Amino acid sequence: SQELEQSPQSLIVQEGKNLTINCTSSKTLYGLYWYKQKYGEGLIFLMMLQKGGEEKSHEKITAKLDEKKQQSSLHITASQPSHAGIYLCGADLNPAASGGSNYKLTFGKGTLLTVNP
Amino acid sequence: DAGVTQSPTHLIKTRGQHVTLRCSPISGHKSVSWYQQVLGQGPQFIFQYYEKEERGRGNFPDRFSARQFPNYSSELNVNALLLGDSALYLCASSLALLGHEQYFGPGTRLTVT
């Protein structure tokens, strides 16, 4: 099974509606990254969360890492067609205290968001 | 400042051939990582380099190799190409090894026929 599960796999919303995408890990999240990707293109960095309970916002997008550090959510308020794309969560599953010296992100499969005008 | 750049943008190769992909990190970033993304999946970690040394390797065969140069740019080499190597190859850079934001380039689309 996947170490990082995203839900839903796809989402279609009407412009102006709010939506939430979830990212759940089977392991402790030592860093959680949200990216947006247009089909076949590179990943656009959205936000990085590291501390349990941390919440960050940028424009109409808010991301939160839960206290137990095994789940994160991405919330979009008043969605617009420009929000359409694939949202990917990437996680650092290596505890720094273990002396891990590489910086490998494990990704979910992504959530495809369609926003209808 | 320029973001992460990758070249070429697209590439078509034949089975059995060799390919070299190139990446230039954001100025000041010393860590470069390579990921492979096949259609419908999230990126899979291939390598990380920091200060010109390999610091991490994912579950990829020895046909995949990489290196980092003194200016922190990097190359990913793949030998004896297979059809299954067709994918988007992404390069990411960050300031250091751990706990820093990781920025991705636009990717190189490799098609193996």
Image (cartoon, coloured by chain):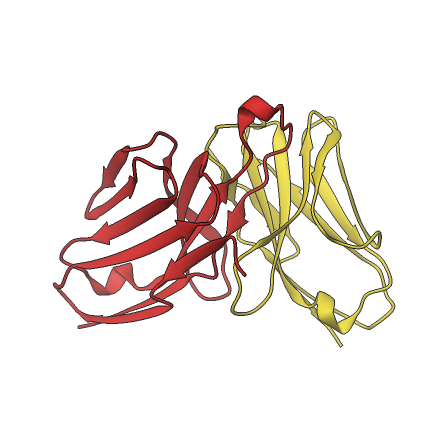
Residue furthest bottom in the image: B113
Q: Is residue B95 visible?
A: no
Q: Position of residue B39 (x, y in %)?
A: 56, 69
- Quadrant of the snapshot with the C terminus of chain B: bottom right
Asked if residue A52 lies left or right of residue B5, the reply is left
Q: Residue at x 74, y 28 (%)?
A: B52
Q: Position of residue B31 (x, y in %)?
A: 61, 31
Q: Residue at x 36, y 35 (%)?
A: A49
Q: How many marks?
A: 0
Is A81 located above or below residue B99 in the figure? below
In the rendered image, what is the letter of the chain coloured red? A
Which sits in the foreground, B98 or A26?
A26
In the rendered image, what is the letter of the chain coloured yellow? B
Q: Residue at x 56, y 37 (%)?
A: B93
Q: Residue at x 45, y 66 (%)?
A: A39
Q: Position of residue A110 (x, y in %)?
A: 43, 61
